[in-house]
Image (spheres, rainbow, N blue to C red):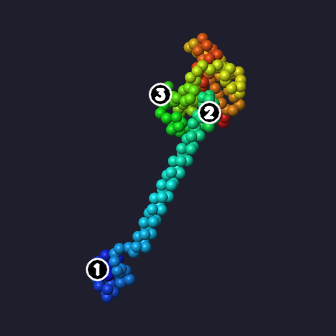
Amino acid sequence: MYCSRCRSGTEANFKFCIKCGAPRRLFVASLELPKRFGGFRRSLGVGFVLILILTILAILFLGRSDLRSLKQGHRSGLDYAEWIVLHKIPMETLGNVLGAPLRIITLSADRKIHWFQIQDGLLGIESPAQIIHFRPNSSRLLNDLPARYGPPSARYVVNDEVINNYSTASQLALTTLAPSSQEKAIKEVILWRIETF
C-alpha cells in the first residue's frame, strides 16, 4: 500500500502513514491513476485540442470571407473609392485587402497618403483623415462623373491645375483635379465624407 499524500510505502495493516500521519482511507494500492481516469483525461485533452483547432479555422475562414467582400471586384475605381468612404473602412483593414502600398507620401508630420494599385488605377488612402484619392489609369472626362454629382459647386485654378468641387446628397464631397490645358480631363479624384453634427 502507498500513502496518496506523501507517496511512501506503508504496511496494509497500519491505520496511519508512518511518515506523514495520513489516515488509512488515503492509502492506495498503486500510485498510478486507474486506466479509466487516464483514458478520460486523454480524451478530454484531445477534445480540447480539436475544439481549439476548429475555433481557429472558423476565425480564419470567417475573417477571410469578410476580407473578400472588401475587394474591388467588378466595381469601377471611382465606385470603389466611394464605397470605402461611405463605409468608413479603416486603413489597416484595407491594407490587409490590398497588400503592401506601392508608395507612401508624407504630407505633414501627422498626414500620409498610402498608394495602392487597384484594377483601373491607383487608390490613395490619406490617414488619419479618411480621405480617399483615386487616379485613373486612362483619362476620364468630367462628363464621366456619375450624374448624382451634378455641376460643380466651386471651380478654382491653382498652379495650372483646375480644381472642381462637387457635393451630393449622400454625404460625400468630391474634388477633381485636371491640368488647365485639358480642363475636362480628370487626373485625380479626391473623396471624403461630410460629417453632420
Check if mark 1's residue and mark 2's residue have beta carbons within 8 Å: no
For label 1, count other residues whose C-alpha is less than 10 Å away and answer few (under 14), some (14-19) or many (20+). some
Q: Is residue 171 left or right of residue 137?
A: right
65 w.r.t. 103: above or below: below
Question: Which residue is disc 2 drawn over?
Answer: 74
Q: Which mark is residue 70?
A: none
Q: Earlier in the sequence, mark 3 or mark 1?
A: 1
Which amino acid, mark 3? Arg
Q: Which mark is residue 9?
A: 1
Question: Which residue is disc 3 drawn over?
Answer: 103
Say what secondary structure mark 2 lies in. loop
Mark 3 or mark 2: which is in front? 2
Which amino acid, mark 2? His
Locate the N terminus and report the quarter of the image it occupies: bottom left
Q: Earlier in the sequence, mark 3 or mark 2?
A: 2
- Residue 124 visible in the current orientation: no
Q: Residue furthest top?
A: 181
Residue 160: x %, y % from top left: 57, 13
Residue at image point 46% right, 59% down? 49
Q: Earlier in the sequence, mark 1 or mark 2?
A: 1
Which amino acid, mark 1? Gly
